[in-house]
Amino acid sequence: MGDSLAQLLPVMLERAGILIIVAFLLSRLKSFRRIIDHEHVMREKVILITVFGVFGIISNYTGIEIHHRSILEEWHIGGLSGSSAIANTRIMGVAIGGLLGGPIVGLGAGLIAGLHRLSFGGYTGIACGISTIIAGIVTGLLGKRFNIREKNAHMRAVIIGVLMECVQMAIILLIARPFESALELVKIIAFPMITVNGFGTFIFMLIIQTILLEEDRTRTLQTHRALYIAQLTLPFFRQGLNKESCEQVAEIILKHTGADAVSITNRHQVLSHVGLASDHHIPLKSMATRLTKKVLEQGNIQKATTKDEIQCYREDCPLSSAIVLPLKAHNHAIGTLKLYFKSTNGLSMVDEELVEGLGRLFSSQLEFAEAERQRILLKDAEIKALQAQVHPHFLFNAINTISCLIRTDADQARKLLLQLSKFFRSNLQGARQMLIPLEKELEHVHAYLSLEQARFPDKYEVSMDIEESVKNVLIPPFTLQPLVENAVHHAFKKMKKGVISIHACQENDKINITTMDNGIGMTEDQRKNLGTQTVQSSEGTGTALWNIKKRIDEIYGQQADFKIDSKPLSGTTITISLPVNEQKWGEEYAKSLYSG
């Protein structure tokens, strides 16, 4: 018997190695890895039943035939005589299937492997078939509480597998006849089968745990990658879906994914296309593919695996497959993100999950951007409503001044009427627009000063030093005129003649606009409060300065600056700095807000 044991153990290890190799190869399949890593629906349970049932069948075919005390090492068993039995690793596959898939998988795999073993015959056929089915049921029930992700799950699986082998030995002794042959068989196969099945279960479970560990690690890396890409794209998606922002976003996605080309669209046209086929996939062209329209209509992800599905009009287009994701805001598709590939299987399962995650993140970014725009619109509307209101006394004073001049200087009265008209027109235009050229704002200032200087000809003088290159720079309306008005009404009290200077120039990547006066100035406490909050005083509320700074912050954020320098009896200097590289964005942003 000792010789039989010494002969059987290495042979069984060799045969168990076949199943371990098969398990390893199976673990490399994406579909199997995905099934192991997800909750099991009925379709996945059927697949697991088939897989582990086939493991049992392979174990039967590669088992070792034992005839009396002789061990036959043939590689294939087609059937057994009435005096023969087999030693194999059938219980191992069934037990693992039950632990992973639960009762249905355990029972299904047990029935397949058990009935197949029963068809082989032999005096242990019935006992082995029954024990296999019982092992499937028991491990399936245990599988409901078995967590493969626990630290010592593989050791628990080994113990369960060993116990199932012990149960099989007991059933052979109870059912197989003659008893003497069954007892002799158990003495030969018990130790090798329990040892090999325990070892095989250990290796198999380590393989499965490695799958899960790799998936968890990959998912963590992909989550980090998705958040990193989302962080890079956030400043651009905050600007909404426009050509400039989408080009930047597409470049980032192309760099950090495995795509060969990236496109972004709104509901009507392609906004950007970077990567391959840029020579004929041109932005700002209307969309021609049914695939993109289907995504916009249904709001679901769609894939193209052939050139025909991509529907490019160029036969030599190198793009062969694509995935199209909806970009949503408030559950409505407002655009699409398209990733193209040269090969038909260019998108891996992991990359597909990354892209789907990015689609959700981008949609959230667009929703936040839309909410931010609506908030800015509301705030801007409130500010515009305030700025559009002309103080009644200014209008009455202007009319009185013009009426007096009609008798003494008709030409001057006519000019002032034109300036008053221009002043009101600038007010109305500023109330409708978010950004206007600096030149238009200066016209507003000039109209205001013309009316004020007509009332007080010698009270103050104004000088302007404006670089020609900055006259078309876009700035928020009602930026300079309220500053000049503040100086006129508050800076020159108790002074015979005041001087107001306006200077605008470009320095590096900033546009600096400065207004200076030689007025009474202010204390440090007054200076700190102005522009940060409204200030209740007998001389005014500081609302104008607060409104200007608030709008600049809303539009440009930290890239702009609003600075007040003042000392008592030394005048006041207010400097506004706006970023040059935001001018085009500002124009597009204004258009997007007021395009309806």
Image (cartoon, grey):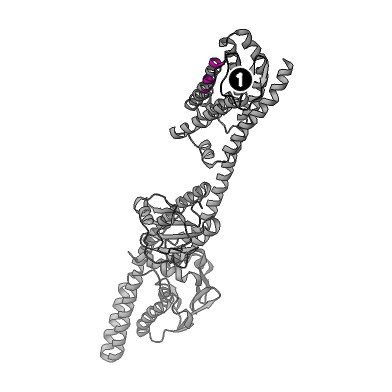
The answer to whether residue 587 of the structure is visible from this angle is yes
Residue placed under numbered mark 1 in the picture? 86
Tell me: residue 429, above or below residue 281. below
Tell me: residue 49, above or below residue 580. above
Q: Is residue 175 left or right of residue 40?
A: right
**Residue, x 41% and y 79% (percent of image)?**
439
Q: Splitting the image into 4 quarters, where does residue 446 fall?
A: bottom left
Q: Dot 1 lies on which element?
A: strand
**Residue, x 40% and y 71% (percent of image)?**
435
**Highlighted range, magenta:** 116-127
Residue 166 image point, x, y percent: 61, 17
Q: Is residue 224 left or right of residue 236?
A: right
**Residue, x 48% and y 81% (percent of image)?**
469
**Amino acid marked by disc 1:** Ile
Tell me: residue 538, above or below residue 87. below
Residue 229 image point, x, y percent: 53, 55
Q: Is residue 483 left or right of residue 252?
A: left
Residue 178 image point, x, y percent: 59, 8
Secondary structure of the magenta portion, mostly? helix
The quadrant in which the N terminus is found is top right
The quadrant in which the C terminus is found is bottom left
Residue 480 image point, x, y percent: 43, 75
Q: Residues within 10 Å of mark 1 (few under 14, many from 20)?
A: many
The answer to whether residue 579 of the structure is visible from this angle is no
Q: Nearer the viewer, residue 424 or 468?
A: 468
Residue 398 is one of the magenta-drawn residues: no
